[in-house]
Amino acid sequence: MHEPATYRVGDFDIAIVSDGHTQLDGGAVFGLVPRVMWEPIVGRENIDDQYRISLALNCMAVRRGDDVILIETGMGDKHGPQVREKIFPGDYGYLPQSLASAGIEFGAVTAVVNTHLHADHCGWNTVRRGDSVVPTFPNARYFIQAGEYEAATHPNERTKGTYFEENFRPLETAGQLELVDGEREILPGVHFIPAPGHTADHSIVVLQSRGETAICLGDLAHNAVQIERAPWIPAFDILPLVSLESKKRMAERAIRDNALLVCVHETVPGVGHLQETNGRRTFVRE
């Protein structure tokens, strides 16, 4: 387990907490980009014999005063052996220990934000208690885009393999679900902003305080190179040309505001800044 990395953005204390990592097909992660182009960036030593690459499961714990906000909740621990071996292989389930290392108890979390509801972003929303599945964070409001919740609860043939109702239906049953329609400041300085493309209602989270900015990218990029090169879009994105425009808008804002970027799937801690020199963009890791 990785120890939490910590940052300060204005009045916000940020800890990057890890749920571990999952393994996904490298070709799917990089979409139309040929392997001869992405393999040198990933490194052959980081590709297994089935051409899967490791994707981190970074989550973002944000503290200010009495507010403790958790952005993304990783893969969780509810998957059975078949799912863990064939669909989402990897080594994960460590978010509780990582939160504890950051000094955060489940009961202290006041808000949870999911950029979208794919299984690797909302797994610890809920936990098994005997024969029931209940919210992991008993005192938290869970913020989810209304359109994303609708898509997740009514999946189609393509999307049903990554939406697991046990990760979000119990939130509604418990009365802790808060659906958001479009852009909203869910807490002072915490902005939930649509950035569609990966899913139709995928969103990012932007923190602003004292002239400083941090952005949790969700799945706008699975690898840092996809921030630098906007056309490099994963095969998972259901609206790739919309993703392209969302990514371009985010990149322009990140450069303008010198924003701290949190990449959910980049190697832990997945944090850096996007810089531009002579028209070339570079993700500079912290």
Image (cartoon, rainbow, N blue to C red):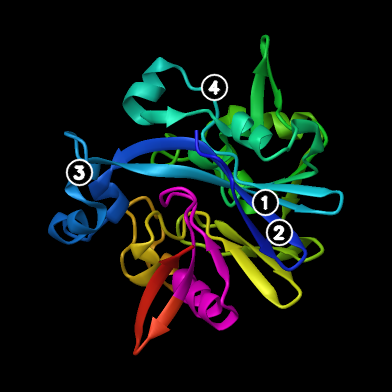
Neighbours of disc 1 within 10 Å: few (<14), some (14-19), many (20+) = some
Q: Residues within 10 Å of mark 3 (few under 14, many from 20)?
A: few
Residue 77 visible somewhere in the drawing: yes
Q: Residues within 10 Å of mark 4 (few under 14, many from 20)?
A: some
Amino acid carrying mark 1 in the image? Ala
Magenta stretch, residue numbers: 246-274
Q: Which residue is mark 2?
A: 181
* Mark in front: 4 vs 2: 4
Residue at x 32% of width, y 25% of height: 86
According to the picture, the residue beneath numbered tag 4 turns out to be 78
Q: Are marks 4 and 3 in contact (CB under 8 Å)?
A: no
- Report the Cα–Cα distance between label 4 and label 2: 29 Å
Q: Nearer the viewer, residue 19 or 143?
A: 19
Residue 52 lies in magenta, yes or no?
no
Tag 2 or tag 3, which sits nearer the N-term? 3
Of 60 and 244, the residue lying toward us: 60
Residue that mark 3 sits on: 45
| Disc 4 to disc 1, C-alpha distance | 24 Å
Q: Is residue 214 left or right of residue 155?
A: right
Q: Is residue 230 visible?
A: no
Question: Which type of secondary structure does the marked residue at label 4 adopt?
Answer: loop
Q: Amino acid at mark 3?
A: Glu
- Give above or below for 198 relative to 86: below
Closer to the N terminus: mark 4 or mark 3?
Answer: 3
Mark 2 surroundings: few (<14), some (14-19) or many (≥20) residues within 10 A: some
Mark 4 vs mark 1: give the one in front. Answer: 4
| Cα gap from disc 3 to disc 1, whole angstroms | 41 Å
